[in-house]
Amino acid sequence: MKLAPRFAVLLATAAVVAGCAPQTSDNSSSDKDETSGTLRVWLFQEVGNDPKAKVVDSVVTAFEKAHKGTEVDVEYIPIDTRAQRVKAAFNDPKSAPDVMEYGNTDTAGYVHDGGLLDVTKEFGAWSEAKDTDPTAKQSVTVDGKQYGSPFYVGVRALYYRTDVFKDLGLQPPKTMAELASTARKIHKAKSDLYGLVVGGAYTYGAMPFVWANGGELATAKDGTYTSAIDSAAAQKGIKAYTSLFTSDNCPAAKCAVMGGNDTITAFAAGKAGMAIGGDFSHSAVEAGKVKGKYAVVPLPGVASGSVAPAFAGGNNIGVLKSTSHRTLAVDLMEQLTSKATQASMFDAMGFLPTFTDVRDAAAAKVPFEKPFVQTLAAGTKFVPASPGWSEIDSSLVLPTLLQEVISGKKSVAAASKDAAKKMNSAFSSAG
């Protein structure tokens, strides 16, 4: 296996071809289905990526052994710059990977752009696919066709420092109001800590506040989406979240630019009393200074004892339409998302499997997963199933909204109204 540098500049490489077979489907924009050569793979760079890389290395080694004359070139790309990289790949097939990890919110947009390969036939014939969680399967489905294989599912909950809470005589908050007051108590008593570390670029850390207050990202009618981010309920949630960017909790000067990975990094480094993180953040926290000194509970909602709706996140792995190695690429996709790989990735990274039987077994042996399973059971939310979402996400409409409010440049009403206009424009242009 040849492992590319994780932050290397994207290079256009030519595959080494030892033989060709007829194209297997007119769905592919390539006229080849090469049976050997180099397969290029893009996977996301995680906080604490080494455990993920070890699992992938094992899969790749077995794949190369089973496919003589085939080499797999893996590159780990920064999540925050994926939009630019993927757009370039779609526009220039010679620079594109064969197999790619992508966020489940990107599916509709990538299909609309013509970048992902329709693997409905192969996915349906794959014996393991029948055990895929229906929600996870939906995340790779557009207009009844599959464009990839689910890799993992994830939701966020509230990480908190057990040593800090014990020292200050605090209990895990049961409401969002208590969450805010607890955060300020922590910072007041320990000024070197953020109470609750939050990020102005952390969309999925902010959205539970909107959803818990009855707001929505958008509403749908006859397949057409209209933004609802400027509704009264959504504005209430935005106010609740942005009110945490203050000197008595998480100063705007430091926290407004933070993304989700930044907040987890701060918590893991012992710089915060609480953080909103996913089950997928576990390995990074375990590798930090707070190991053995934290616990997790569901993020509380508005009413006492309720759970704030979490974004039903996760990633998928798909094959690019431009691949000249269709059969090999689909096989590698299945190996990277197989039950065995997902079980190993759970052990390595804490990523919740998308296969119901594998996830049940994983959660049963790891008590840590209980609050995340509870969050899933309480009800989750997803982004609008519109190709326009990719534009909304990549153009940072929601982070811009948050940062405009946090900086004081605009009121919640003005910023959310402007964001709604941008969202509606994206929905309209996407069709």
Image (spheres, helix red, strand yellow):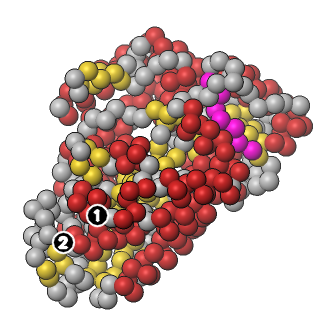
> In this picture, is 413 found above or below 131?
above
Across and down, in percent, residue 122 comes to 26, 63
**In screen coordinates, is 369 left or right of 328?**
right
- In which image quadrant can residue 327 be found? bottom left
- Image side of residue 25 versus residue 240, left or right: left
Q: Is residue 399 visible?
A: no
Question: Taking the image as drawn, is residue 234 in sight?
Answer: yes
Which quadrant: the N terminus? bottom left
Q: What stretch is highlighted in magenta?
A: 295-301
The residue wearing badge 2 is 324
Is residue 296 shown in magenta? yes
Query: For residue 148, what is the image quadrant?
Result: bottom left
> How far separated are the C-alphas under marks 2 and 1?
22 Å
Magenta region includes residue 255 = no
Residue corresponding to mark 1: 125
Q: Which amino acid does label 2 sit on?
A: Ser
Disc 1 residue type? Ala
